[in-house]
Amino acid sequence: MSARRAAWAYLSQVAQGPCAPLVELVEAVGPEEAARAVRGAALPEALSTRTQARRHIDSADRDLDMIGRLGGRLLTPDDEDWPAWRLLAFDGLDSRRERESAPPLALWVLGERPLTELTERAVAVVGTRAASGYGEHVTGQFVDDLAGRGWTVVSGGAYGIDGAAHRAALAAGGATVAVLACGVDRAYPAGHARLLREIAGEGAVVSEYAPGTTPARHRFLARNRLVAALADAVLVVEAGARSGARNTATWASRLGRPVLAVPGPVTSASSVGCHRMIREGEALLASRSADVVEVAGPVGVGGEDGGPVRPLDGLSAKAALVYEALPASGSVGLPELAESSGVPVESVRGALPVLELAGLVGSDGTGWFRRG
């Protein structure tokens, strides 16, 4: 372990979240000299106040050993994998007026894939923890199609919409990134321990907090800025009147990321926040994944309204695979359709009613067949 990496680890646990003065000090003198200054309290008053309670704690060796045993790593601005271009958006914010308006000092990461690769084309999908069946279904449809188009899904690993987004991305064979408000060694929520392991296997679990850090409300609010920063756009599927997802959307707007919201039933309390964001111009209305791609991707990507309507337009990636696997003539049963499409039987069973409602397929006593 190099002295420089140990200095980064020490500064990460001293800062405990966004700290613009410390970021500025490291940029000016480097991590090793900054660490010496923090330990000796040879600092300006603003930074001394932020670090004095924890400057005596030096758990760098332990933290680096722990992240190594977990199969992870400490990612710093020294590394090629540091998402520098994503974090440039913080340069346009006034971090002196709001302490959270600062990039992370370093990131603790579980997962082997480069973070720069994972976030090259990424959409953040967020929403309420108290998701409805409608919200989880819509999340699955959007994410399934986005993953099929090669987009990484970024979210916060929480229950509700976050969890639905991560699961849908994994089910579609796509990449996903979970940004935590605690150390990556802690499964939070505990019910998502297995899900977080799967995310690390196919994408990354990321936190700016050192191992051992417990979750806290202010850390969730700070975490939201990283969810927004690591994506090209933020999609809010369901949000109550006081949902934390709206905080993520606010960060997205401040960082120059487009925000979209999915409308829900007018009687649903889970969609009140989305409706308000759309009504007040805080978010664009999203009714399909192409709406997201149109604003998140390069100019000219995803806009299909001006072209001819195709039978598969608007379908999820799995539904399209199921449709294309149907024979040109004759009918086929569920097991054969799953085998030829490469889609699990349960997903085929869910896609067929959607295709039937679209007038693309029909069924008889022998199985399913194409219409037209």
Image (cartoon, helix red, strand yellow):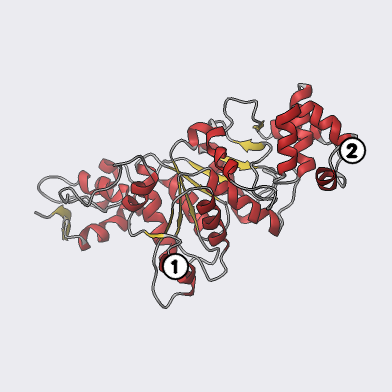
Q: Position of residue 184 (x, y in %)?
A: 67, 43
Quick one: SS at disc 2? loop
Label 1–label 2 contact, CB within 8 A: no
Helix, strand or loop under label 1? loop
Which residue in the rendered view is the most extreme toward the top? Answer: 2
> Observer-nearest residue: 250 or 242?
250
Tag shown at residue 280: 1
Q: Quadrant of residue 372?
A: bottom left
Q: Nearer the viewer, residue 335 or 296?
A: 296
Of 53 and 6, the residue lying toward us:
53
Which residue is pictured at 25% across the width and 41% down the height? 340
Horizontal side of residue 183 vs 287, given as left or right:
right
Q: Residue at horizontal 84%, vertical 41%?
A: 44
Q: CA distance from mark 1 to mark 2?
A: 47 Å
Q: Which residue is mark 2?
A: 41
Tell me residue 161's x, y (percent).
50, 59
What residue is shown at x 57% (from left), y 28% (from top)? 81
Q: Is residue 189 visible?
A: no
> For this view, does 245 lie left or right of residue 289?
right
Image position, residue 78 (x, y; %): 65, 25
Q: Which residue sits at x=49%, y=38%?
A: 119
Is residue 12 at all visible to an observer of this figure? yes
